[in-house]
Image (spheres, rainbow, N blue to C red):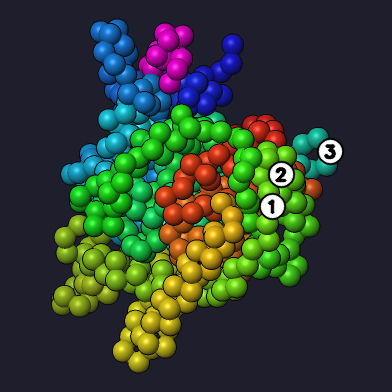
Amino acid sequence: MTALTDLTVTALRDGVAQGEFTATEVATAFNAAVAEAQGALNAFIVTTPEKALDAAARVDADRAAGKPLGKLAGVPIGMKDLFATQGTQTTAASHILEGFVPQYESTVSQKLWDAGAGMLGKLNLDQFAMGSSNETSAFGNVISPWRRPDGQGGLDTAALAPGGSSGGSSAAVAARIVPAATGTDTGGSIRQPAAFTGISGIKPTYGRCSRWGIVAFASSLDQAGPMARDVADCALLLETMAGFDPKDSTSLNLPVPDWSAALSADLRGKKVGIPREYRIEGLNADVAKSWDDGIAWLKDAGAEVVDVSLPHTKYALPTYYIIAPAEASSNLARYDGVRYGLRDLPDHAGLQDMYAATRAAGFGAEVKRRILIGTYVLSAGFYDAYYTQAQKVRTLIARDFTEAFAQCDVILTPTAPSSAFALGEKSADPLEMYLNDVFSVPASLAGLPAMSVPAGLDSTGLPLGLHLIGKPFDEQGVLNAGLALEQRAAFTARPKKWW
């Protein structure tokens, strides 16, 4: 019999519903897997085995009583520690929020619990979601379950980055210690970690999922989404997470489609755009090959491939790294030591001294860097030169996509410019680290749905992802193209267990 921890979300839900195993057996198996891996992977900030078991007991009782079960009944998941969870510490991986226990539940997590899911714990991430490698957490680095082969049948000992900021989520799903996890994506924080660890992840259209109860980084960019082992699981989870929320002024007041029921890998009549500007100089040969493979797979699924242009792509990264830090500097001003979280109060200090001491002690180096950048670009002398210009360029980037989608239904690119790198390899150079988001940032700036799907392994034996970008509100088109890629890539590789 297949181990319970090897089953997908759909298989777990159906198995519980059909009585093949109980929800309590599922929760117990995943709790044990989490406990075994946590010391090596550091994927969780807080584990909550009792919450997983409590949710499972309710599902088992409902099934025994003949009550209808929710869409995710019996499925325990990992919750990125950016989502407020009532009664459970929520830190955004920052010392400044250590010990903060919300008295309310985020809209997205509440929807998941209402559907019958349980919580295995709060997953580690880059501090305040700022990072591409999960090296900025105040609670230590997340270690990818993947290791490079050493060429002698064993594994290299170098610890690899699981991607960021949703690195705890990607590592936990890839290691089979959670069947699925929530993530958030501001500039690629669902898609890049998914690519690094050989799993699937989708960022929906901006506004599809409520931001209420999610610790804010950049409010015009942040969007929640699911991370799981396959496209069908992502569709099922997104159906549960999405929906209008009057508590979020940017929430889309649209019905949530039944994406999983409409999944189809038949792309006949569809056009796939290949943006010429993404063939960047010096593109990694393995990444280029996987992109070419993806083009061939979508043709095989019946799609017509067309050349498209996104001419303002080259300005996307600098635009993002003006807008996102500007919004972050505003959002993070609330952490002042007065109302909640850390308070550092030096002797005989005044209010301003307390603010300064609390923020100096509570924020990590990357967060401070982005706050400083954001404060600078919003300052009186530079607002028009930087922030106003960046917003104009953002409009041009969005217009590029509108014009491209007049010629195609979905766009295919690589997810990241390389496979996973070693921890510490890029952390000394922030600019090199920021380049990890070069393919994912444009879709975020335009608010478009985008997904990463595993494409295969590179020449060093590490996963690569393919990236699909869709029209506004067309998550179905992205999921369908993702399913077509998934079926043809036939990606079954998984990390060899070393923990």
Q: Which residue lies furthest to the front in this view?
A: 269
Residue under the image location 48 percent in, 24 percent down: 10
Residue placed under numbered mark 3 in the picture:
152
Q: Is residue 76 above or below residue 213?
A: above
Q: Which of 255 and 216 is in front in this view?
A: 255
Query: Does the magenta portion include 281?
Result: no
Query: Does the magenta portion include 19?
Result: yes
The answer to whether the residues at label 3 and label 1 have Cβ atoms under 8 Å apart is no
Q: Check disc 2: other Cα within 10 Å, few if <14, some if 14-19, many if 20+.
A: some
Residue under the image location 23 percent in, 39 percent down: 87
- Asked if residue 498 lies left or right of residue 89, the reply is right
The secondary element bearing badge 1 is classed as strand
Residue placed under numbered mark 2 in the picture:
299
Separation of residues labelled 1 and 2 (CA atoms)? 7 Å
Q: In this view, does 189 lie above or below 430?
A: above
Horizontal and vertical percent position of residue 428 = 59, 69
Tell me if I can see residue 408 in this picture: yes
Residue placed under numbered mark 1 in the picture:
305
Camera-nearest label, 3 or 2? 2
Sequence-wise, which precedes: disc 3 or disc 1? 3
Count of picture labels = 3
Name the amino acid type tagged 2. Lys
Q: Which of 389 and 89 is in front in this view?
A: 389
Q: In this view, does 465 lie above or below 235?
A: below
